[in-house]
Amino acid sequence: MSIENFMEEQGEVAARTLERADAQDFARGVLDGGSAYDRVLFVGSGSSLNALTIVRPWLQSAIGRPVEVVNPAVFLRDIGAVFGNPLVVILSQSGTSSTSIEAARVVSGKGWQVVVITADPESPIGALGLPMILLPIGEEPIGPKTKGFTASIAACFRLAAGLARRDLPQLAAQSVDATTEASRMAVASLIGGQALPSYIVVTGSGRHFGVALEASLKIAEIAGVATAGFEPEELLHGRLHGTDANSLVIMIAADEQERDLASHTSVVMAERGVKVVLLNLTEAATPFDWFHLDAGAVQPLDTILASIPFQRLAVDLALRRVMIPDAMTYPGLSKALAIKTFTR
Protein backbone atom coordinates (compact mmCIF):
# COMPACT_ATOMS: atom_id res chain seq x y z
CA MET A 1 0.00 0.00 0.00
CA SER A 2 1.15 3.55 -0.67
CA ILE A 3 1.45 6.40 1.77
CA GLU A 4 -1.70 7.94 0.30
CA ASN A 5 -3.68 4.84 1.29
CA PHE A 6 -2.39 5.12 4.85
CA MET A 7 -3.38 8.78 4.94
CA GLU A 8 -6.91 7.83 3.91
CA GLU A 9 -7.15 5.37 6.82
CA GLN A 10 -6.40 7.96 9.51
CA GLY A 11 -9.99 8.71 10.45
CA GLU A 12 -10.82 5.11 11.26
CA VAL A 13 -7.46 4.48 12.94
CA ALA A 14 -7.65 7.58 15.15
CA ALA A 15 -11.19 6.77 16.21
CA ARG A 16 -10.23 3.17 16.99
CA THR A 17 -7.23 4.33 19.02
CA LEU A 18 -9.33 6.71 21.10
CA GLU A 19 -11.78 3.89 21.85
CA ARG A 20 -9.16 1.47 23.17
CA ALA A 21 -9.05 0.89 26.92
CA ASP A 22 -5.38 0.01 27.46
CA ALA A 23 -4.14 3.60 27.90
CA GLN A 24 -6.87 4.35 30.41
CA ASP A 25 -6.30 1.04 32.18
CA PHE A 26 -2.61 1.78 32.63
CA ALA A 27 -3.36 5.27 33.94
CA ARG A 28 -5.94 3.85 36.34
CA GLY A 29 -3.39 1.37 37.61
CA VAL A 30 -0.91 4.18 38.28
CA LEU A 31 -3.51 6.22 40.16
CA ASP A 32 -5.10 3.33 42.06
CA GLY A 33 -1.67 2.14 43.11
CA GLY A 34 -1.06 5.42 44.90
CA SER A 35 1.90 6.24 42.69
CA ALA A 36 4.22 8.90 44.04
CA TYR A 37 5.71 9.70 40.63
CA ASP A 38 7.10 13.21 40.74
CA ARG A 39 7.16 13.93 37.02
CA VAL A 40 6.65 12.37 33.62
CA LEU A 41 9.47 11.68 31.17
CA PHE A 42 8.36 11.30 27.56
CA VAL A 43 10.98 9.46 25.48
CA GLY A 44 10.90 9.15 21.69
CA SER A 45 12.63 10.10 18.45
CA GLY A 46 11.51 11.43 15.07
CA SER A 47 7.73 11.46 14.68
CA SER A 48 7.39 9.90 18.14
CA LEU A 49 9.25 12.85 19.66
CA ASN A 50 6.96 15.25 17.80
CA ALA A 51 3.81 13.47 19.01
CA LEU A 52 5.05 13.61 22.60
CA THR A 53 5.89 17.31 22.19
CA ILE A 54 2.27 17.87 21.19
CA VAL A 55 0.91 16.20 24.34
CA ARG A 56 3.45 17.58 26.85
CA PRO A 57 1.98 21.05 27.61
CA TRP A 58 -1.58 19.74 27.97
CA LEU A 59 -0.56 16.96 30.34
CA GLN A 60 1.68 19.20 32.44
CA SER A 61 -1.13 21.71 32.90
CA ALA A 62 -3.63 18.96 33.69
CA ILE A 63 -1.61 17.09 36.35
CA GLY A 64 0.35 20.00 37.82
CA ARG A 65 3.66 18.12 37.62
CA PRO A 66 6.65 18.60 35.33
CA VAL A 67 6.50 16.78 32.01
CA GLU A 68 9.71 16.57 29.97
CA VAL A 69 10.26 15.37 26.40
CA VAL A 70 13.64 13.91 25.53
CA ASN A 71 15.03 11.82 22.71
CA PRO A 72 16.32 8.41 23.80
CA ALA A 73 19.98 9.07 23.00
CA VAL A 74 20.00 12.08 25.34
CA PHE A 75 17.99 10.14 27.91
CA LEU A 76 20.56 7.34 27.90
CA ARG A 77 23.45 9.79 28.07
CA ASP A 78 22.00 11.61 31.08
CA ILE A 79 20.22 8.76 32.84
CA GLY A 80 22.67 8.85 35.73
CA ALA A 81 21.44 12.35 36.56
CA VAL A 82 17.75 11.35 36.64
CA PHE A 83 16.70 11.36 40.29
CA GLY A 84 13.43 10.87 42.10
CA ASN A 85 10.59 8.71 40.86
CA PRO A 86 9.64 9.54 37.24
CA LEU A 87 6.89 7.92 35.23
CA VAL A 88 8.60 7.03 31.93
CA VAL A 89 6.57 6.83 28.71
CA ILE A 90 8.49 5.46 25.72
CA LEU A 91 6.85 5.86 22.32
CA SER A 92 8.13 3.87 19.34
CA GLN A 93 5.55 3.12 16.67
CA SER A 94 7.64 0.51 14.88
CA GLY A 95 9.27 -0.81 18.05
CA THR A 96 12.57 -1.00 16.16
CA SER A 97 14.25 2.33 16.99
CA SER A 98 17.60 1.28 18.41
CA THR A 99 17.97 3.93 21.10
CA SER A 100 14.34 3.65 22.19
CA ILE A 101 14.79 -0.11 22.67
CA GLU A 102 17.91 0.48 24.74
CA ALA A 103 16.17 3.16 26.81
CA ALA A 104 13.33 0.75 27.57
CA ARG A 105 15.79 -1.99 28.50
CA VAL A 106 17.70 0.28 30.87
CA VAL A 107 14.58 1.71 32.49
CA SER A 108 13.23 -1.77 33.16
CA GLY A 109 16.01 -2.28 35.70
CA LYS A 110 15.55 1.06 37.47
CA GLY A 111 12.38 0.31 39.38
CA TRP A 112 10.59 3.27 37.83
CA GLN A 113 7.08 3.01 36.45
CA VAL A 114 7.30 2.67 32.68
CA VAL A 115 4.98 2.05 29.77
CA VAL A 116 5.82 1.43 26.12
CA ILE A 117 3.54 2.65 23.33
CA THR A 118 4.02 0.74 20.08
CA ALA A 119 2.10 -0.72 17.16
CA ASP A 120 3.86 -4.09 17.17
CA PRO A 121 3.81 -6.23 20.32
CA GLU A 122 6.27 -8.64 18.68
CA SER A 123 8.83 -5.96 17.90
CA PRO A 124 12.12 -5.78 19.81
CA ILE A 125 10.72 -3.18 22.19
CA GLY A 126 7.53 -5.19 22.69
CA ALA A 127 9.55 -8.31 23.49
CA LEU A 128 10.99 -6.66 26.61
CA GLY A 129 7.80 -7.51 28.49
CA LEU A 130 7.12 -4.02 29.84
CA PRO A 131 3.59 -2.65 30.28
CA MET A 132 2.35 -1.78 26.82
CA ILE A 133 -0.19 0.41 25.06
CA LEU A 134 -0.87 -0.77 21.52
CA LEU A 135 -1.50 1.42 18.51
CA PRO A 136 -4.17 -0.35 16.41
CA ILE A 137 -2.85 0.74 13.04
CA GLY A 138 -1.91 -2.47 11.29
CA GLU A 139 1.04 -2.38 8.94
CA GLU A 140 2.75 0.87 8.00
CA PRO A 141 6.15 -0.17 6.64
CA ILE A 142 6.73 3.12 4.82
CA GLY A 143 9.39 5.32 6.44
CA PRO A 144 7.40 8.58 6.80
CA LYS A 145 4.63 7.82 9.31
CA THR A 146 1.14 9.23 8.72
CA LYS A 147 -1.59 7.13 10.34
CA GLY A 148 0.99 6.00 12.90
CA PHE A 149 1.70 9.61 13.83
CA THR A 150 -1.92 10.66 14.29
CA ALA A 151 -2.65 7.41 16.17
CA SER A 152 0.31 8.18 18.43
CA ILE A 153 -1.19 11.58 19.25
CA ALA A 154 -4.52 9.91 20.02
CA ALA A 155 -2.99 7.23 22.26
CA CYS A 156 -0.82 9.71 24.17
CA PHE A 157 -3.74 12.05 24.80
CA ARG A 158 -5.82 9.07 25.96
CA LEU A 159 -3.08 8.19 28.44
CA ALA A 160 -2.72 11.83 29.49
CA ALA A 161 -6.46 12.18 30.05
CA GLY A 162 -6.43 9.06 32.22
CA LEU A 163 -3.57 10.38 34.36
CA ALA A 164 -5.39 13.70 34.72
CA ARG A 165 -8.80 12.13 35.35
CA ARG A 166 -10.22 14.16 32.49
CA ASP A 167 -12.42 13.40 29.52
CA LEU A 168 -11.42 14.04 25.93
CA PRO A 169 -13.78 15.49 23.33
CA GLN A 170 -15.21 13.29 20.64
CA LEU A 171 -13.29 13.17 17.37
CA ALA A 172 -15.32 11.34 14.75
CA ALA A 173 -13.64 9.51 11.91
CA GLN A 174 -15.77 11.61 9.56
CA SER A 175 -14.11 14.81 10.82
CA VAL A 176 -10.68 13.41 10.05
CA ASP A 177 -11.84 12.17 6.65
CA ALA A 178 -13.32 15.58 5.82
CA THR A 179 -10.05 17.28 6.72
CA THR A 180 -8.15 14.80 4.55
CA GLU A 181 -10.37 15.59 1.57
CA ALA A 182 -10.27 19.36 2.14
CA SER A 183 -6.48 19.18 2.28
CA ARG A 184 -6.34 18.09 -1.36
CA MET A 185 -7.96 21.30 -2.59
CA ALA A 186 -6.01 23.49 -0.17
CA VAL A 187 -2.65 22.09 -1.27
CA ALA A 188 -3.58 22.27 -4.94
CA SER A 189 -4.44 25.94 -4.47
CA LEU A 190 -1.19 26.63 -2.62
CA ILE A 191 1.29 25.03 -5.02
CA GLY A 192 -0.63 24.35 -8.21
CA GLY A 193 0.79 26.06 -11.28
CA GLN A 194 3.44 27.89 -9.25
CA ALA A 195 7.17 27.50 -8.78
CA LEU A 196 7.82 25.16 -5.89
CA PRO A 197 9.37 26.65 -2.75
CA SER A 198 12.99 25.81 -2.05
CA TYR A 199 12.61 26.42 1.69
CA ILE A 200 9.54 25.95 3.90
CA VAL A 201 9.21 27.21 7.46
CA VAL A 202 6.39 26.12 9.79
CA THR A 203 5.56 27.67 13.16
CA GLY A 204 3.26 26.68 16.00
CA SER A 205 2.85 27.42 19.70
CA GLY A 206 2.07 25.20 22.68
CA ARG A 207 0.72 21.84 21.56
CA HIS A 208 1.01 23.00 17.93
CA PHE A 209 4.78 23.41 18.20
CA GLY A 210 4.94 19.62 17.87
CA VAL A 211 2.71 19.84 14.80
CA ALA A 212 5.14 22.34 13.28
CA LEU A 213 8.07 20.04 13.98
CA GLU A 214 6.25 17.10 12.42
CA ALA A 215 5.29 19.19 9.38
CA SER A 216 8.93 20.12 8.89
CA LEU A 217 9.96 16.47 9.22
CA LYS A 218 7.34 15.17 6.80
CA ILE A 219 8.13 17.71 4.08
CA ALA A 220 11.86 17.00 4.35
CA GLU A 221 11.41 13.19 4.44
CA ILE A 222 8.85 12.87 1.68
CA ALA A 223 9.63 15.75 -0.68
CA GLY A 224 13.30 16.44 0.04
CA VAL A 225 12.66 20.16 0.51
CA ALA A 226 14.68 22.13 3.06
CA THR A 227 12.49 22.89 6.08
CA ALA A 228 12.49 24.26 9.60
CA GLY A 229 10.03 24.29 12.49
CA PHE A 230 9.99 27.07 15.08
CA GLU A 231 7.94 28.73 17.76
CA PRO A 232 6.52 31.95 16.22
CA GLU A 233 8.64 34.14 18.51
CA GLU A 234 11.80 32.44 17.30
CA LEU A 235 10.76 32.90 13.68
CA LEU A 236 10.32 36.63 14.19
CA HIS A 237 13.64 37.04 15.98
CA GLY A 238 15.92 36.67 12.99
CA ARG A 239 14.83 33.56 11.10
CA LEU A 240 12.81 35.49 8.54
CA HIS A 241 16.06 36.98 7.26
CA GLY A 242 16.81 33.52 5.88
CA THR A 243 13.71 33.56 3.66
CA ASP A 244 13.24 35.00 0.18
CA ALA A 245 10.83 34.97 -2.74
CA ASN A 246 11.41 31.21 -3.16
CA SER A 247 10.42 30.49 0.45
CA LEU A 248 7.08 29.61 2.01
CA VAL A 249 6.20 30.35 5.62
CA ILE A 250 3.19 28.58 7.19
CA MET A 251 2.05 29.76 10.62
CA ILE A 252 -0.36 27.64 12.68
CA ALA A 253 -2.84 29.90 14.50
CA ALA A 254 -4.87 28.21 17.25
CA ASP A 255 -6.24 31.31 19.00
CA GLU A 256 -6.99 34.96 18.28
CA GLN A 257 -3.61 36.25 19.43
CA GLU A 258 -1.72 33.79 17.24
CA ARG A 259 -4.04 34.57 14.31
CA ASP A 260 -3.43 38.31 14.62
CA LEU A 261 0.33 37.84 14.88
CA ALA A 262 0.39 35.59 11.82
CA SER A 263 -1.78 37.99 9.84
CA HIS A 264 0.52 40.89 10.69
CA THR A 265 3.54 38.82 9.71
CA SER A 266 1.87 38.02 6.38
CA VAL A 267 1.44 41.72 5.62
CA VAL A 268 4.98 42.68 6.65
CA MET A 269 6.65 39.89 4.70
CA ALA A 270 4.50 40.37 1.59
CA GLU A 271 6.05 43.83 1.34
CA ARG A 272 9.39 42.05 1.18
CA GLY A 273 8.37 39.46 -1.38
CA VAL A 274 8.02 36.51 1.04
CA LYS A 275 4.81 34.46 1.13
CA VAL A 276 3.35 33.80 4.59
CA VAL A 277 0.10 31.85 4.94
CA LEU A 278 -1.97 30.60 7.88
CA LEU A 279 -3.25 27.24 8.95
CA ASN A 280 -6.10 28.89 10.82
CA LEU A 281 -7.81 26.88 13.57
CA THR A 282 -9.87 29.77 14.92
CA GLU A 283 -13.47 30.73 14.21
CA ALA A 284 -12.72 33.82 12.10
CA ALA A 285 -11.14 33.52 8.67
CA THR A 286 -8.40 35.86 7.38
CA PRO A 287 -7.32 36.91 3.87
CA PHE A 288 -4.07 35.01 4.45
CA ASP A 289 -5.54 31.58 5.20
CA TRP A 290 -4.11 28.58 3.42
CA PHE A 291 -6.29 26.17 5.37
CA HIS A 292 -9.12 27.31 7.65
CA LEU A 293 -10.57 24.85 10.13
CA ASP A 294 -12.55 25.96 13.18
CA ALA A 295 -11.44 23.15 15.50
CA GLY A 296 -12.11 24.67 18.90
CA ALA A 297 -14.63 22.00 19.86
CA VAL A 298 -12.09 19.18 19.65
CA GLN A 299 -9.11 20.74 21.43
CA PRO A 300 -6.55 19.29 22.15
CA LEU A 301 -7.29 16.73 19.42
CA ASP A 302 -7.23 19.58 16.91
CA THR A 303 -3.56 18.64 16.63
CA ILE A 304 -4.59 15.51 14.74
CA LEU A 305 -6.58 17.57 12.24
CA ALA A 306 -3.83 20.19 11.92
CA SER A 307 -1.25 17.54 11.00
CA ILE A 308 -3.14 16.24 7.97
CA PRO A 309 -2.77 19.19 5.54
CA PHE A 310 1.01 19.04 6.00
CA GLN A 311 1.03 15.35 5.07
CA ARG A 312 -0.84 16.18 1.87
CA LEU A 313 1.51 19.08 1.15
CA ALA A 314 4.54 16.82 1.54
CA VAL A 315 3.13 14.18 -0.80
CA ASP A 316 2.05 16.66 -3.48
CA LEU A 317 5.41 18.43 -3.36
CA ALA A 318 7.10 15.08 -3.93
CA LEU A 319 4.83 14.27 -6.86
CA ARG A 320 5.49 17.67 -8.41
CA ARG A 321 9.21 16.98 -8.06
CA VAL A 322 8.72 13.60 -9.82
CA MET A 323 9.64 11.72 -6.64
CA ILE A 324 8.06 8.62 -5.13
CA PRO A 325 6.61 9.83 -1.80
CA ASP A 326 6.94 6.40 -0.20
CA ALA A 327 10.64 6.11 -0.99
CA MET A 328 12.06 9.36 0.41
CA THR A 329 15.13 11.08 -1.05
CA TYR A 330 17.67 8.52 0.15
CA PRO A 331 16.08 5.05 0.34
CA GLY A 332 17.76 2.85 2.92
CA LEU A 333 19.22 5.78 4.85
CA SER A 334 17.80 4.63 8.20
CA LYS A 335 19.52 1.27 7.79
CA ALA A 336 22.79 2.89 6.75
CA LEU A 337 22.66 5.16 9.79
CA ALA A 338 21.80 2.19 12.05
CA ILE A 339 18.87 3.96 13.72
CA LYS A 340 16.60 0.92 13.32
CA THR A 341 17.19 -2.69 14.31
CA PHE A 342 15.60 -4.26 11.20
CA THR A 343 15.44 -7.58 13.01
CA ARG A 344 12.03 -8.60 11.65
Image (spheres, rainbow, N blue to C red):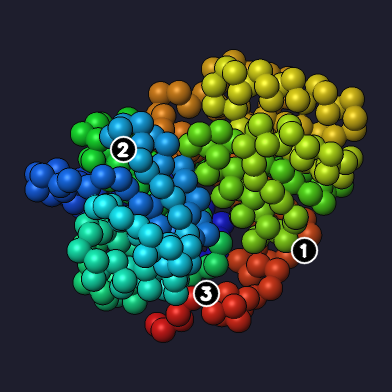
Lower position in the chain sequence, tag 3 or tag 2:
2
Disc 1 is placed on an element classified as: loop
Q: Are marks 1 and 3 in contact (CB under 8 Å)?
A: no
Please tell me which of labels 2 and 1 falls first in the chain.
Answer: 2
| Horizontal side, residue 177 vs residue 82: left or right | right
Question: What is the quadrant of residue 64 in the picture?
Answer: top left
Q: Earlier in the sequence, mark 1 or mark 3?
A: 1
Callout 2 touching callout 1 (CB < 8 Å): no
| 84 and 135: which is toward the camera | 84
Q: Which circle marks residue 14 in the picture?
A: none
Instruction: Write the residue at 66% across / 67% down.
Output: 328
Q: CA distance from mark 3 to mark 2?
A: 32 Å
Mark 1, residue position: 322
Q: Residue at x 66, y 54 (%)?
A: 219
120 with respect to 342 (left or right):
left
Task: Sort mark 1 into few (<14), some (14-19) or many (20+) by Cα contacts within 10 Å.
Answer: few
In the image, 22: left or right of 243? left
| Residue 145 visible here | no
Q: Quadrant of the C terminus?
A: bottom left
Name the kind of residue labelled 2 in the image: Arg
Residue 9 in picture, x, y percent from top left = 44, 52
Q: Is residue 109 above or below residue 310?
A: below
Q: Which residue is the extreme one toward the bottom? A: 343
Q: Looking at the picture, does residue 33 appear above or below residue 343? A: above
Q: Nearer the viewer, mark 1 or mark 3?
A: 3
Choose between 144 and 112: the one closer to the eye. Answer: 112
List the residue tagged with mark 3.
Answer: 339
Q: Secondary structure at mark 3?
A: loop
SS assignment at label 2: loop
Query: Looking at the image, how many numbered discs can be counted on the residues?
Result: 3
| Residue under pointer 2 | 65
